[in-house]
Image (tube, rainbow, N blue to C red):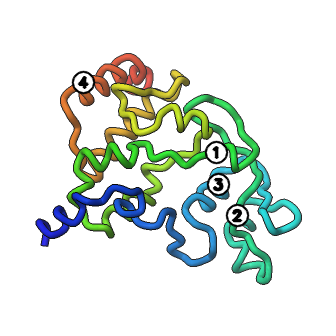
Amino acid sequence: MLLATILSNVDATTRTDRWGKGWSDDDRDCQDTRAEMLIKNSKDKIKFKRVGGVYDREDADRGNQAMSGKSFCHVTQGEWFDPYTGKTLRLANDLDVDHVVPLNHAWQMGAAKWPMARRRAYYNDWDNLILVSKGENRSKGDKGPLEYLPPRESFLCEYVQRWEFIKKKWGLNIPRAEAQKIAEVKSHHCKAIHR
């Protein structure tokens, strides 16, 4: 069974082949993982594409159940803080949901051996997801901590700790050079936290 999974994954070249159809909507309320992250992380009231008015997080989160006949599927506005840059953003289209440990990196570090159900779970794992500006997410791409660290220094400790946590949680390979870089960042940026 494992050999068959590995062999079928060898030819997986597109994002859909590797990770499935994208964000999931496990509770079937039309709010996929991205929409739910936008709702739960907004610091201000939220606007939706096809619904007039603005809504508190609690109302937006239960919108389709609480207010039938309205479509609380697509978030357009709110207020979000990008921990990578320190910027505040108000338009949902200016944000990406970043996989802290990027998909292609995970694929190369062991995810290629996983069955699709496990890969789908990884794709939608909230521990590995963070809202950041589109531009910064594009700068990061599929890079690991050897090639990319967020520009906001006060977030570096949390970033590498989260990276390491995700790698261990999912059993992904941590190459020696990567482990050394994580240790280096921790020694320079996590001191105050461990005192």
- Mark 2 is surrounded, within 10 Å at the Cα level, by few (under 14), some (14 to 19) or many (20 or more) other residues, namely many
Q: Residue at x 31, y 47 (%)?
A: 106
Which residue has dot 4 on it? 180
Question: Label 1 near label 2: C-beta < 8 Å?
Answer: no
Question: Label 1 near label 3: C-beta < 8 Å?
Answer: yes
Rendered location of residue 51, percent (x, y): 83, 68
Q: Residue at x 33, y 43 (%)?
A: 105
The quarter holding residue 13 reads bottom left
Instruction: Determine the secondary structure under disc 1.
Output: strand
- Real-space CA distance between mark 3 and mark 4, rounded to the nearest whole angstrom: 34 Å
- Real-space CA distance between mark 4 and mark 1, rounded to the nearest whole angstrom: 31 Å
N-terminal of the pair, mark 2 or mark 4, is 2
Question: Of discs 3 and 1, which sits in the foreground?
Answer: 1
- Mark 3 is surrounded, within 10 Å at the Cα level, by few (under 14), some (14 to 19) or many (20 or more) other residues, namely many
Instruction: Determine the secondary structure under disc 2.
Output: loop
Rendered location of residue 10, percent (x, y): 22, 58
N-terminal of the pair, mark 3 or mark 1, is 3
N-terminal of the pair, mark 4 or mark 1, is 1
Which residue has dot 2 on it? 74
